[in-house]
């Protein structure tokens, strides 16, 4: 009887041992999968799915979206020249390098784990070899949806949505106050000088236009509607500026550009100018429509329109 039991017990031990080994292997495999899923996420970009870090720590932005990334408290190691010159970004960009889509060696040295830019950037294939590269077409998404997409890309969708909900509420409330003060029918136009050109803007080309027209529901002059709504902006000569001027004008001013038109009688006789209803701001602070820029723009409008 004992001789029969010994092989049976031995066989039982082998089965138990094998089972334990399989369980340990399965557990190890599950841990590896969990670790892998925690390290990367799949972002559905406009060009298809892209595997990106779940918690990126070394991001390069080659165009437009630096403020969105910084607003979500994600570290940058490189930004484009337009972002680098924005005074509103200065405190966030200490030690951050200025790069372009052609600075491949410099980008390699910065060792990014994610690269973001507009769909018009060069060398996308080469950049993808350095780090996952995600591009967006400017204007394809409205400005708040764009921020939400950056939030999804950075695995911070909730944070992005929370800010959007809060911002819309605050901007709408400020708009009601402003309309109550300046009148329901008052018009507002946004102009900007660059080099020797003068531009007027529609409702989706930054410079505070999204806040004024989309959130605050302030009125745009008819001439601006006819010329700038479709493309987002319109180039005009200084001589015809009075036709585009609202009761109030926001002047996004490049001091290093041509501002001589402000000394002309044509300009000085615009009602908004004569009534002290032109509000000037540094253009470099108004170029973008990310949360950092938008918070500044909202505060600027509340200050100028409401005297806060």
Image (cartoon, helix red, strand yellow):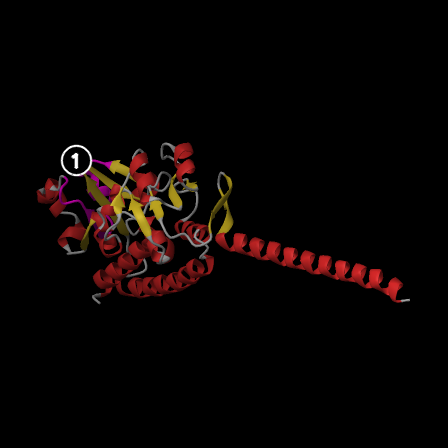
Foreground residue among 99 and 131: 131
Which residue is depicted at the point 31% across and 33% down? Answer: 102
Which residue is depicted at the point 24% across and 54% down? Answer: 88
Mark yes or no: residue 306 visible.
yes
Q: Position of residue 107 (x, y in %)?
A: 32, 40
* Quarter-of-image position of residue 1: bottom right
The 10 Å Cα crowd at callout 1, few under 14, some 14 to 19, many 20 or more, is few
Q: Where is residue 103 in the image (x, y as percent from the top left)?
A: 29, 35
- The quarter of the image holding the C terminus is bottom left
Q: Is residue 256 magenta?
A: yes
Foreground residue among 148 and 116: 116
Please indicate whether residue 190 sits to the left or right of residue 10 in the image.
Answer: left
Q: Position of residue 217 (x, y in %)?
A: 36, 56
Foreground residue among 156 and 164: 156
In this view, the residue farthest toward the right is: 1
Q: Mark 1 points at which residue?
A: 196
* Quarter-of-image position of residue 22: bottom right
Q: Is 65 drawn above or below residue 73 in the view shown?
A: above
Q: Is residue 126 magenta?
A: no
**Mark 1: which secondary structure?**
loop
Please indicate whether residue 290 sits to the left or right of residue 2 in the image.
Answer: left
Magenta-tinted stretch: 236-257
Foreground residue among 277 and 185: 277
């Amino acid at each position: 009887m004992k001789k029969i039991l010994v092989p049976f017990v031995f066989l039982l031990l082998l089965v138990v041992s094998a089972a334990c080994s399989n369980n340990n292997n399965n557990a190890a495999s599950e841990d590896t999968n969990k670790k892998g899923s925690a390290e990367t996420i799949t972002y559905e970009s406009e060009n298809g799915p892209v595997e990106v870090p779940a918690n990126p720590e070394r991001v390069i932005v080659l165009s437009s979206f630096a403020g969105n990334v910084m607003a979500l408290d994600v570290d940058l190691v490189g930004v484009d020249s337009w972002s680098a010159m924005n005074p509103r970004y200065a405190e966030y960009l200490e030690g951050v390098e200025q790069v372009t889509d052609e600075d491949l060696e410099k980008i390699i040295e910065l060792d990014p784990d994610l690269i973001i830019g507009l769909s018009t950037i060069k060398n996308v294939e080469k950049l993808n070899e350095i780090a996952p590269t995600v591009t967006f077409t400017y204007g394809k998404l409205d400005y708040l949806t764009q921020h939400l997409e950056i939030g999804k890309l950075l695995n911070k969708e909730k944070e992005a949505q929370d800010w959007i909900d809060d911002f819309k509420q605050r901007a709408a409330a400020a708009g009601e106050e402003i309309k109550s003060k300046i009148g329901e029918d008052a018009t507002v136009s946004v102009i900007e000088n660059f080099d020797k050109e003068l531009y007027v803007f529609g409702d989706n080309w930054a410079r505070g236009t999204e806040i004024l027209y989309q959130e605050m529901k302030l009125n745009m002059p008819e001439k601006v509607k006819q010329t700038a709504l479709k493309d987002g902006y319109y180039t005009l000569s200084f001589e015809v500026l009075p036709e585009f001027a609202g009761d109030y004008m926001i002047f996004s001013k490049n001091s290093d550009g041509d501002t001589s038109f402000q000394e002309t009688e044509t300009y000085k006789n615009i009602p908004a100018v004569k009534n002290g209803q032109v509000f000037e701001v540094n253009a470099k602070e108004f170029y973008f429509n990310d949360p950092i820029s938008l918070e500044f723009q909202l505060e600027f409008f509340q200050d100028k329109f409401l005297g806060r």
